[in-house]
Image (spheres, rainbow, N blue to C red):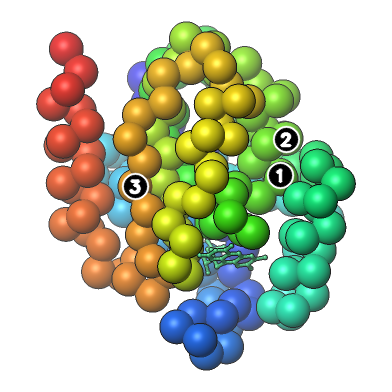
Amino acid sequence: MTAIVYFSRPFENLIDGKKKYLQVGNTKIVAQKIAKILNTEMFEILPQIAYPEAYEEVVTQAEQEKGTNKRPKYRPFSLDLANHQTIYLGYPNWWGTFPMIVATFLEENDLSGKTIYPFCTHEGSGMGSSINDLKKLCPDSMIRIGLPIRGSRVEKSTIAIKNWLQHEQSKIK
Ligand SMILES: Cc1cc2nc3c(=O)[nH]c(=O)nc-3n(C[C@H](O)[C@H](O)[C@H](O)COP(=O)(O)O)c2cc1C
């Protein structure tokens, strides 16, 4: 079976250089589209302590978390990994890679032998170093080609998502 696991932070963000308040985070919108296309369950990585709503505050906090290689705690959810061979893993690009709370999830769950399809929303840096960082944390997983989507384009990303899903899945026998 396949599952989608993602982290996404709504609230204030900088989109195309302008402050914008997002009711639903960009990555969550992409996760919802993938879930609809694949008819797959979604699991959200929710922080135990919510991230700040203010953009500058979360940027500072995220920089500190990356600098100290922190592992922020998330609220437990009931994903039975034994029954899931394929994970679609979604996250925003924070300071060039996935947020440290995603690293917490990857370290607390054994994804050895599983196939991971990463997808990421960003404001210009694409997937950054997240694929390499993912390979380091999950050396025994099959990491497939990732899908980067610009935050301001998520609403219009359905075709890009479908192309990515078809292209990637056609390579699996
Ligand atoms: C703390 C923080 C750090 C960010 N760092 C980067 C970055 O290094 N490169 C980039 O392209 N975008 C960066 N962004 C922009 C986000 O990746 C982008 O807005 C993303 O779509 C947010 O997804 P979300 O709404 O699902 O959280 C950053 C945003 C935040 C809040």
Pointer 1 local density, CA inside 10 Å: few below 14, some 14–19, many at least 20: many
Which residue is found at the position 58% from the left and 55% from the top? 96
Please state the horizontal and vertical placement of residue 137, each as a whole percent of the image: 63, 25
Query: Which quadrant would residue 2 be assigned to in this image?
Result: top left
Q: In the displayed structure, does residue 105 sit left or right of residue 144?
A: right
Pointer 2 local density, CA inside 10 Å: few below 14, some 14–19, many at least 20: some
Residue type pointed to by label 3: Leu
- Write down the residue under mark 3: 147
CA gap, disc 2 and disc 1 = 5 Å
In this rendering, the answer to whether 167 lies above or below 173 is below
Of the image marks 1 and 3, the number of the one nearer the N terminus: 1
- Write down the residue under mark 1: 101
- Determine the secondary structure under disc 1: helix
Tell me the tag on residue 104: 2
Answer yes or no: disc 1 within 8 Å of ligand 1: no
Asked if the residue at tag 1 contacts the one at tag 2, i.e. Cβ–Cβ closer than 8 Å, the answer is yes
> Does residue 40 appear in the picture of this structure?
no
Answer yes or no: disc 3 within 8 Å of ligand 1: no
* Between 149 and 89, the one nearer to me in the picture: 149
Please state the horizontal and vertical placement of residue 133, each as a whole percent of the image: 59, 35
CA gap, disc 2 and disc 3 = 21 Å
Pointer 3 local density, CA inside 10 Å: few below 14, some 14–19, many at least 20: some
Please state the horizontal and vertical placement of residue 44, each as a whole percent of the image: 57, 45
Residue type pointed to by label 2: Thr
Which residue is found at the position 57% from the left and 21% from the top? 138
Answer yes or no: disc 2 within 8 Å of ligand 1: no
Please state the horizontal and vertical placement of residue 108, each as a whole percent of the image: 72, 24
> Looking at this rendering, what residue extends furthest in the bottom direction?
18
